[in-house]
Image (tube, rainbow, N blue to C red):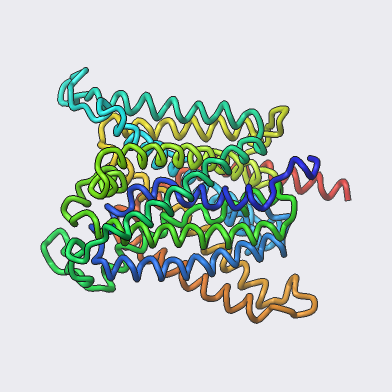
Amino acid sequence: MENHRKLGIWVLTALVVGNMVGSGIFMLPRSLVEAASPLGVMLAWLLTGAGVLMTALVFGNLAIRKPNLSGGPQIYAKELFPKGSNLSILSGFMSSWGYWVGNFAGNVAIITTFASYLSTFFPVLTSEKTVLEIDSFALKLGNLLTFLVCTALLWGMHIIILRGVEDAGKLNFVATAAKVLGFFLFIVIALFAFDKAVIGPLDAPRYDGDGQPIGLLGQLNNAALSTLWAFVGVESAMVFASRARKQADVKRATIAGLLIALAIYIGISFLVMGVLPQRELIQSEKPLVDAIVAIVGPAGGYVLAALGLISLLGSTLGWILLSAEVPYQAAKQGLFLPAFLKENKKRVPSFSLTLSNALAQLFIFSTISNSMAAAFDFVIYIATLAYLVPYLIASVFQLKLALTGETYAAGRGRLADGIIAALATIYSVWVVIAGTADMKTFLLGVALLASGVIFYPQVKKAAQQANEKQKLSA
């Protein structure tokens, strides 16, 4: 691939910001105000931001030190064990599998949020009119139309991406630039409407299902998993490292994208809490639109909803790109089914793209029976856990490099990288523990990983054949 056809730093940064500032920015204010007090929310953002910054530094450093290992943080799992061993292949495949499933499941959260914001212009998408009744199941008109809209968006993006990854990346850049400008404008407007009386006491109590008060640490744990969802996508530049013009651009794009997204998230989530009362915010299916309507009236709601649609189109494009790239790059490393190596004439991983979207389509069926907010929460539980283990794996692998001195010939930067890796590892372990404390969430995460076991024998066979070819050629 010629250099001019590769991804530059601006496109890579747009992929990071576009994938991070996706559905979360529109729906998380509702989830967070339910999980924690304003003080708990702010502490969760700061703690998660610091932890993800350490993780982002790990990603950027590994992209430079191990440029041959591209495709996402899960790819490093195989490097934690002897090369070519069963443990190496199994860990590499299982982490890639979970990460891939999390990707296309996460797409659905973005796509359903798109439908939610489209309902601002087409209220029929929330219609409760029954169009079909079978026994106890009643299909609502709004749910049916939402399903059709989500399906059309998914496969429309599929067609765009088939025309070329680089062109799709440029389109994502335009959408991301528009939404970043729009969100900063929202922050400026909301600053003038912010009301301390609406947000209430910073340490306002929160209660569990039994009516028992939840302490600040408990609130922090509750909010941490939701805030982590907002940062999922920080590895986007790393996934496309093999398509980058310079490996150094991967690190720069990752850090720049993280800082831009963090500023947007903290500003918007806190300001929305000072515009909409807690009870109203919890009930909202489009919190940002409801907030701007409360400030400037219905016209502002339409403008923000339009911005949301542009934003979510870009995020959908970026995440579908990511979900196709992950198994494709894993297959190149011998860690996924060989069929995922198939490309079209534009060097797009066509088989991976088609299967990823076909499986995402299955998740979209959840809109038939659930509200858009319920579908969003359900998918967050599944998708977020799929990212926790790969983030931990990347941090542990960077720690291993720092401890052994591998890739540190002159020893320069080894101590600093070791400290960063240790902090990223501690953060990742804490989030895994917090994220799997709930039994339902834990079982969903285990089921997600276990679902790939049936394909492992085929992956192992392909990996062994690839190793034999390498030995013969040597």
- Relative side of 343 to 370, left or right: right
- Quarter of image, res 257: bottom right
In this rendered view, identify the residue nearer to me: 105 or 453. Answer: 105
Please provide percent x and percent y for residue 383: 42, 48
Q: Residue at x 69, y 76 (%)?
A: 404
In this rendered view, identify the residue nearer to me: 303 or 216. Answer: 303
Compared with 54, 441 (above or below) is above
Q: Residue at x 50, y 40 (%)?
A: 314
Please provide percent x and percent y for residue 43: 34, 71
Q: Residue at x 42, y 55 (%)?
A: 230
- Residue 361 shows up from this direction: yes
Q: Residue furthest right?
A: 474
- Quarter of image, res 417: bottom right
- Relative side of 254 to 347, left or right: left
Q: Residue at x 65, y 45 (%)?
A: 329
- Residue 91 shows up from this direction: no
- Relative side of 371 to 351, left or right: left
